[in-house]
């Protein structure tokens, strides 16, 4: 009887302990965050507008180079793991109080496949590893690239951007609602040929020379970039041979019958002979800040640097039939520029590189070649999307 009583007491104790443990688990589950709402405000770093006939001037964050259409947002915890991915371009996002960090990719393609790629991201690293294609800057909203084989087709309103904040949502400690400002930076740089002149008459080598501009195009461009800012070049754009992949005119400056998918990085055929006498005091003027040419490109290292190439007919005298030559201007090149340059030959995202170029010498027969600094003087201005400058004099 006594033994049975002791055994029954032991069984009841075990059951009671099991019951308490079960109850504790049910009443105090592992906390994964309470439902919360994020109200998102997007801002732009250094906003300007753009067109193909005049340099950008607008400061409106909803137009021009600051336009945002579709965007994907990712909310992440303190360990950078995904809490919520929103692909609906919503500024009010339902999430949980676990959220501590945010990424916003703007002007994404926004196709079903694109949305699925973002939705599948399990971390900030995966989100940033997704890529943007430069050819999509040929559409007004960054969501199509059907105009990539059309010259001068880049648009100012579809530039890919990324915004990041790694220290937000602290208000979730006491509230389930948070308002967050995320500032977007463009993944592209802008290259402006802001001024193009020649002053051959002021030289001793070619005092009677003249030049007619036939095309302006980009050379050795990175056309793919992760949202984390790592740029690369599609293998089809790898430069080789004696012509540039973005070059769209033939050896006579006549537009090719069939344009390539990189025509968007070319001016197309030009016949600009300029006006003026060709001296330092009165140069021949081809382009000014009111009639520039400029292109959007992804950042680039100093290895095989990006160039803006001026192509045209060079004549040593009025009796010369002329030779089609190139003036390849290395962007942000310290040796070529007349002013001080840092990070020589490096292109940085969300920067504008403005070139003022004066031709004073003979160009080269291949855009892969480099001209000597004496052949062209270059003044370069570089700014964080509020203007950067290089002045080049080619002698």
Image (spheres, rainbow, N blue to C red):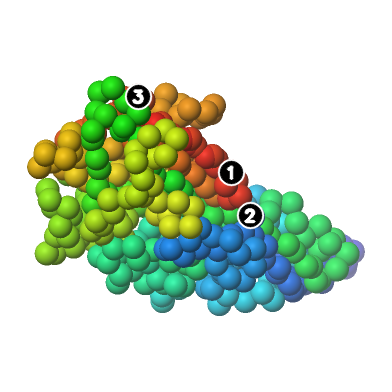
Query: How far is disc 3 from disc 2 in space, using C-alphas?
Result: 34 Å
Judging by the rendered image, the residue that carries numbered circle 2 is: 46
Query: How far is disc 1 from disc 2 in space, using C-alphas?
Result: 9 Å
Judging by the rendered image, the residue that carries numbered circle 3 is: 374
Q: Local crowd at mark 3 within 10 Å, few (<14), some, or many (≥20)? A: some
- Rendered residue at 46%/72% (across/down): 141
Task: Name above or below for residue 59 compared with residue 272.
Answer: below
Query: To which quarter of the image does residue 256 belong?
Result: bottom left
Residue 63 screen position, x and y as percent: 58, 70
Residue 272 screen position, x and y as percent: 28, 54
- Rendered residue at 38%/34% (across/down): 279
Q: Nearer the viewer, mark 3 or mark 2?
A: 3
Query: To which quarter of the image does residue 15 belong?
Result: bottom right
SS at mark 2 in the image: loop
Q: Please state if 234 lies on the left or on the right of 166 as rendered.
A: left
The number of numbered discs placed on residues in the rendered structure image is: 3
- For residue 383, the mark is 1
Q: Please state if 199 lies on the left or on the right of 391 as rendered.
A: left
Residue 35 screen position, x and y as percent: 74, 74
- Rendered residue at 28%/22% (across/down): 204
Q: Nearer the viewer, residue 2 or 140?
A: 140
- Given contact means CB atoms under 8 Å apart, are the residues at marks 1 and 2 in contact? yes
Task: Name above or below for residue 97 compared with residue 299.
Answer: below
Which circle's residue, 3 or 2, is located before the other in the chain?
Answer: 2
- Given contact means CB atoms under 8 Å apart, are the residues at marks 3 and 1 in contact? no
Query: To which quarter of the image does residue 72 belong?
Result: bottom right
SS at mark 3 in the image: loop
SS at mark 1 in the image: strand
Which circle's residue, 1 or 2, is located before the other in the chain?
Answer: 2
């Amino acid at each position: 009887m006594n033994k049975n009583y002791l055994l029954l007491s032991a069984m009841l104790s075990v059951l009671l302990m099991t019951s308490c443990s079960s109850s504790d688990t049910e009443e105090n589950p592992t906390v994964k965050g309470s439902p919360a709402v994020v109200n998102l405000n997007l801002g732009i770093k250094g906003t300007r507008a753009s067109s193909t006939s005049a340099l950008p001037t607008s400061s409106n964050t909803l137009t021009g180079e600051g336009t945002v259409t579709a965007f994907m947002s990712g909310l992440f915890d303190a360990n950078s793991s995904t809490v919520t991915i929103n692909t609906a371009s919503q500024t009010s996002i339902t999430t949980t109080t676990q959220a501590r960090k945010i990424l916003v990719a703007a002007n994404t393609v926004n196709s079903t496949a694109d949305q699925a790629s973002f939705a599948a991201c399990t971390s900030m690293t995966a989100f940033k590893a997704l890529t943007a294609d430069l050819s999509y800057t040929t559409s007004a909203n960054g969501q199509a690239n059907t105009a990539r084989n059309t010259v001068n087709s880049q648009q100012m309103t579809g530039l890919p951007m990324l915004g990041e904040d790694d220290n937000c949502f602290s208000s979730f400690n006491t509230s389930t609602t948070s308002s967050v400002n995320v500032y977007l930076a463009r993944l592209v740089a802008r290259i402006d040929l802001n001024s193009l002149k020649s002053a051959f008459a002021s030289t001793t080598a070619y005092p009677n020379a003249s030049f007619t501009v036939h095309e302006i195009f980009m050379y050795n461009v990175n056309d793919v970039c992760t949202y984390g800012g790592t740029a690369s070049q599609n293998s089809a754009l790898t430069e080789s041979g004696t012509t540039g992949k973005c070059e769209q005119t033939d050896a006579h400056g006549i537009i090719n019958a069939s344009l390539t998918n990189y025509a968007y990085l070319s001016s197309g055929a030009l016949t600009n002979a300029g006006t003026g006498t060709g001296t330092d005091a009165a140069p021949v003027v081809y382009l000014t800040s009111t009639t520039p040419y400029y292109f959007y490109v992804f950042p680039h290292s100093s290895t095989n640097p990006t160039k803006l190439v001026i192509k045209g007919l060079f004549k040593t005298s009025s009796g010369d039939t002329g030779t089609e030559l190139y003036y390849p201007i290395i962007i942000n090149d310290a040796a070529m520029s007349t002013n001080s340059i840092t990070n020589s030959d490096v292109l940085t995202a969300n920067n504008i590189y403005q070139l003022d170029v004066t031709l004073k010498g003979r160009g080269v027969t291949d855009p892969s070649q480099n001209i000597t600094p004496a052949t062209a003087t270059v003044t370069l201005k570089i700014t964080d999307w509020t203007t950067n400058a290089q002045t080049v004099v080619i002698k």
